[in-house]
Image (cartoon, rainbow, N blue to C red):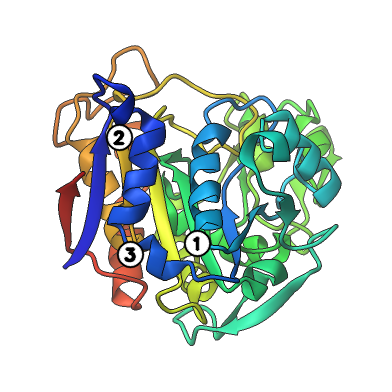
Amino acid sequence: MADVYFASLRARSHRESKVQKIRRLFDAAGFDEVVRPGDLTAIKVHVGERGCDTYINPVFARQVVDKVKERRAHPFITDTGTLYAGSRADAVRHTVTAIEHGFDYAVVGAPVIIADGLRGGHWGEVAVDGKHFQSVRIAGDILAAESMLVLSHVKGHDTAGFGGAIKNLAMGCAPPSGKAEQHAARPCLESENCIGCGRCLQVCPQAAVTLVDGRARFNPERCVGCGDCMRSCDLGAIEFDWTTEIRPFLERLSEYALGAVRGKPGRVGYINFLLGITPDCDCVPWSDAAIVPDIGILASTDPVAIDHASFDLINSEKGFARTALGENLAPGEDKFKGIWDYTDGGYQIAYAARIGLGEEAYRLIEV
């Protein structure tokens, strides 16, 4: 049973601020053993797509950076390039977006280094011997770091259902080609709903869509399964067969997460922020209303346990009305299925435990 440390959001003095609680969580979770003097330490964050505003507060990231420096290690803020077109599709635009969102040296006290290089070509193979992959592609500068602290904004996701530490490891530590390997699914067209507007052509990062006789047509050899076309279509003409694709996707995701930490035994720590718990990944260029109240901050050296605790804490809350949460508002009901009814957020936790990424059972310890 893994230990997961929890700090609530109640505060009646300066000693109980979120800033102080993050520093206490660092100590309680044993991150002083994760980070050693002289380490180049990756601080893995998601800086948010331009237009999103619910990414982790850079002031919170600064507390982790400062604690790493107290260990006489050398931290850097890091993320990887996106599969889809957007404000983080290459290292230049990604760095600019990070700075616009407050992840500059003056605020966080560490440089931003996009770990997979200028255009996503800097990566290495890591053996995982999994059901889907013998090896996975992990960003080169994440592989090169001696230690890593993974800071995750916990929220929903239109494919994974639930996004926490496991997803941050899997998608966030992979170059675009690795993200494409995880997605793998391909869209299908409900032709009676397609009006030939061409919006899907405009957003496709691989030019995999053409218009033929006034209807969209997909080139499966070019499509990477990123889902941009589906999200762009207001008419519901583009779908994925989630009845058969969800669990294999979550298995691929979990195997990539395993690859991201392989080679760093005992040298990775996790902090999950249960704040602004939105329906969507921070990859979308907006932030929808939160589905449950803010809950707190968790820390652990086990990514499976911290995600399981986060999943349970969110589902124990009463959901907010007038949000994307269409059902399952009662305490104890699966909030993520209440948003995306075809998803299976808990399965990634079970599968990740099965392949040895961490322990599903946890002990919640309040600090």
Amino acid under disc 2: Gly
Amino acid under disc 1: Arg
Residue 315: percent from left, percent from top = 22, 37
Residue 313: percent from left, percent from top = 22, 40
Q: In this orientation, which residue lies closer to the viewer: 170 or 333? A: 170
Task: Specify whether 184 is left or right of 317.
Answer: right
Query: In terms of secondary structure, where does tag 3 sit?
Result: loop
Q: In this orientation, which residue lies closer to the viewer: 134 or 32? A: 32
Task: Specify whether 338 is left or right of 206.
Answer: left
Q: Residue at x 37, y 31 (%)?
A: 18
Q: Residue at x 74, y 55 (%)?
A: 114
Q: Which residue is mark 1?
A: 71
Distance between the Cα atoms at labels 1 and 3?
21 Å
Q: Which residue is mark 2?
A: 296
In the drawing, what numbered circle is on residue 302? 3
- Looking at the image, the residue that sits furthest to the top is 322
Residue 274: percent from left, percent from top = 35, 36
Amino acid under disc 3: Asp
Q: In this orientation, which residue lies closer to the viewer: 239 or 139? A: 139
* Labels 3 and 2: the sequence-earlier one: 2
Nearer to us: label 2 or label 1: 1
Q: Dot 2: within a 10 Å radius of its alpha carbon, few (fewer than 14), some, or many (20 or more) residues?
A: some
* Labels 2 and 1: the sequence-earlier one: 1
Q: Residue at x 35, y 28 (%)?
A: 17
Query: In terms of secondary structure, where does tag 2 sit?
Result: strand
Q: In this orientation, which residue lies closer to the viewer: 116 or 322? A: 116
